[in-house]
Image (cartoon, rainbow, N blue to C red):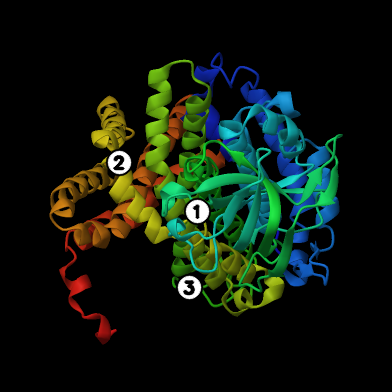
């Protein structure tokens, strides 16, 4: 059976030593959460997911969710009790507005806790994750009346939320949506249509489910400009705010799918269900993007989280399983065989996973702090810079973290050999669960196109130039640091490739849009690898500072070896990515369609 230990010490090291958490001490959003409070909250959260949530991961996968004849759905055994404990512990509303029953802690803290939840049990973590996304969209765009009616129960997690975008004939291309909304004349609408692939769309964890539904008001323009967003509850609240009358939304079926069996993926049929407009008419995508962007960062977390739990179990296996002998001769002659950990290729796989995990966690912490500034800083310039960085990094993290998360789960499975393919060891579940993260909330190829087609040229390239400037300033400031010199080469080379690739795209993408499309995936991964190299450089600087003070630990000392491994074995991939993307679109587009 797999196990999991949340990396609280590593998270706190990143906050305190790498990103100088103390500099935020008096900033809005941070002042109520000094580092000792943050550490205490993360430690308690870790204990909760390790003891309550993680033991349900494999049983939830085996049992799955069941739909009954009346359209109701039951979740796996133990999920309902665990979810009740999650709500009662205040974990769903950790960063929620106290006005609506939330804990009022910084949003970044909820993001960091989410990694632990997902590592423990991805399918379970999706229920509160989607709810928090619905809360964010409503906080940004719903009327005060709708907030008062729905947010108190959603913020605490007593009710759960979903987002309903996809229909049988449209996924990424939301302009094709057919679900319609007919005004009742009293400010509400009748919503009719079918939505598919709705995560957490029906279940028994909460008394009510609040769906955020994209639909087209009668007479609205065609395409994305005619889409509106509606709140559609499973049960209509009565005068006291309690669920009462059923509201014409029924689960027609649940999907039988590759992974995340403990989370319901529902087909929802709307038959004149009563809903209320969120924000302005025909501006639904603008409102829904609050939830979608948050969800994309949440899915990035999933990539890291699965990679982490897969690594932990693969490393434990490699230090326990005996197979073969060391290439240098028996490492333990008195034993029948040596441990797997002596073999270079086993170490290669484990080090590739861990070197990604630690840099990815650093990038997650960095972006979570940026998100806090975007939400709470009183300085408009700080908010703008933070918004720019968030917009730029969201498709990069979603695409790169989830691609790498899946590949790392496969590597971890490989460490176990044949046992990795057997269900009882849990590794094959990590592989299956990780696969969806590359697809939902915008497939990774779409993330790459979003990065190249929208995020790079936005505001004249302001965000990407700021990112280049940030790394350039770091390199310039550390130029005289002899101890850091051995760790600079990978970052300098990666940054050079990324800058050259960006220039190539600016020239060749405009001349032929297919060049941009053909280059986009490699560019996204080149960008991600450069960002990870930057994180490793910052981690090394902090680790060296701890060593200089005589205040290091074996775990921090190990980061220097991991950083060298990353620079020697992983960062050079940016050269191949640069070569591929600058090859252009000619050979990709040359073969006629009928030849495929």
How many discs mark residues in the rendered view? 3
SS of the residue at dot 3? Answer: loop
Mark 2 or 3, nearer chain start:
3
Picture coordinates of residue 538, whole percent (x, y): 40, 35
Q: Is residue 587 above or below residue 291?
A: below
Compared across the picture, whether 467 is left or right of 214 comes to: left
Picture coordinates of residue 202, whole percent (x, y): 74, 59
Q: CA distance from mark 3 to mark 1?
A: 27 Å
For marks 1 and 2, give the one nearer the viewer.
Answer: 1
Q: Observer-nearest residue: 526 or 389?
A: 389
Compared across the picture, whether 582 is left or right of 335 comes to: left
Residue carrying label 1: 354
Residue carrying label 2: 486
Residue carrying label 3: 329
**Residue 4 can be seen, yes or no:** no
**Residue 509 can be seen, yes or no:** yes
In the rendered image, which quarter contains the C terminus? bottom left
Residue 462 lies in quadrant: top left
For marks 3 and 1, give the one nearer the viewer.
Answer: 1
Q: Is residue 496 above or below residue 101?
A: below
Label 3 neighbour load within 10 Å: few <14, some 14-19, many 20+: few
Q: Residue at x 15, y 69 (%)?
A: 586
């Amino acid at each position: 059976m797999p196990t999991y230990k949340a990396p609280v010490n590593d998270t706190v090291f990143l906050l305190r030593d790498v990103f100088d958490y103390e500099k935020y001490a008096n900033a809005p959003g941070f002042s109520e959460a000094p580092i000792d409070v943050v550490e205490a909250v993360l430690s308690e959260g870790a204990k909760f997911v390790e003891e309550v949530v993680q033991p349900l991961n494999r049983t939830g996968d085996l049992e799955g969710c069941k739909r009954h004849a009346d359209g109701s759905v039951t979740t796996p055994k133990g999920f309902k009790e665990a979810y009740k404990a999650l709500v009662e512990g205040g974990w769903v509303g950790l960063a929620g507005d106290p006005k609506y029953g939330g804990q009022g802690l910084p949003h970044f803290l909820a993001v960091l806790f989410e990694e632990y939840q997902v590592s423990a049990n991805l399918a379970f973590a999706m229920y509160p994750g989607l709810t928090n996304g619905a809360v964010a969209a409503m906080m940004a765009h719903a009327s005060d009346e709708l907030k008062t009616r729905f947010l108190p129960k959603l913020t605490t997690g007593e009710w759960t939320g979903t987002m309903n975008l996809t229909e049988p004939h449209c996924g990424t291309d939301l302009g094709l949506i057919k679900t319609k909304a007919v005004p009742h004349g009293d400010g509400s609408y009748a919503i009719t249509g079918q939505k598919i692939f709705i995560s957490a769309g029906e279940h028994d964890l909460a008394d009510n489910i609040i769906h955020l539904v994209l639909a087209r008001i009668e007479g609205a323009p065609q395409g994305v400009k005619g889409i509106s967003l509606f709140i559609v509850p499973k049960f209509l609240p009565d005068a006291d705010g309690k669920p009462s009358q059923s509201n014409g939304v029924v689960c027609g079926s649940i999907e039988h799918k590759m992974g995340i069996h403990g989370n319901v993926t529902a087909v929802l049929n709307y038959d004149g269900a009563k809903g209320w407009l969120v924000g302005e008419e025909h501006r639904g995508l603008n409102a829904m993007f609050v939830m979608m962007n948050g969800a994309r960062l949440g899915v990035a977390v999933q990539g890291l989280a699965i990679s982490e739990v897969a690594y932990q179990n693969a490393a434990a296996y490699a230090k326990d399983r005996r197979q073969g002998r060391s290439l240098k001769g028996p490492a333990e002659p008195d034993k029948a065989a040596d441990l797997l950990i002596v073999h270079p290729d086993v170490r290669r796989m484990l080090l590739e996973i861990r070197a990604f995990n630690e840099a990815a966690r650093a990038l997650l912490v960095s972006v979570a702090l940026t998100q806090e500034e975007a939400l709470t800083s009183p300085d408009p310039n700080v908010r703008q810079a933070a918004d720019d960085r968030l917009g730029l990094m969201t498709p990069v993290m979603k695409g790169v973290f989830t691609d790498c998360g899946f590949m790392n789960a496969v590597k971890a499975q490989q460490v176990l050999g044949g046992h990795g393919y057997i269900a009882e060891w849990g590794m094959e579940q990590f592989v299956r669960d990780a696969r969806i993260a590359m697809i939902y909330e915008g497939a990774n190829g779409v993330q790459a196109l979003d990065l190249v087609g929208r995020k790079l040229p936005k505001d004249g390239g302001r965000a990407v130039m700021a990112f280049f400037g940030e790394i350039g300033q770091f390199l310039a400031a550390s130029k005289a640091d002899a101890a850091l010199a051995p760790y600079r080469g990978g970052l300098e080379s990666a940054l050079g490739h990324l800058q050259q690739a960006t220039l190539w795209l600016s020239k060749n993408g405009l001349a032929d849009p297919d060049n941009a499309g053909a280059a986009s995936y490699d560019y996204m991964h080149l960008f991600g690898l450069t960002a990870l190299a930057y994180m490793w450089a910052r981690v090394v600087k902090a680790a060296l500072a701890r060593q200089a003070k005589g205040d290091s630990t074996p775990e921090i000392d190990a980061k220097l070896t991991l950083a060298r491994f990353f620079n020697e074995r992983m960062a050079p991939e940016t050269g191949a990515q640069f070569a591929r993307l600058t090859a252009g679109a000619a050979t990709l587009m040359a073969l006629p369609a009928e030849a495929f």
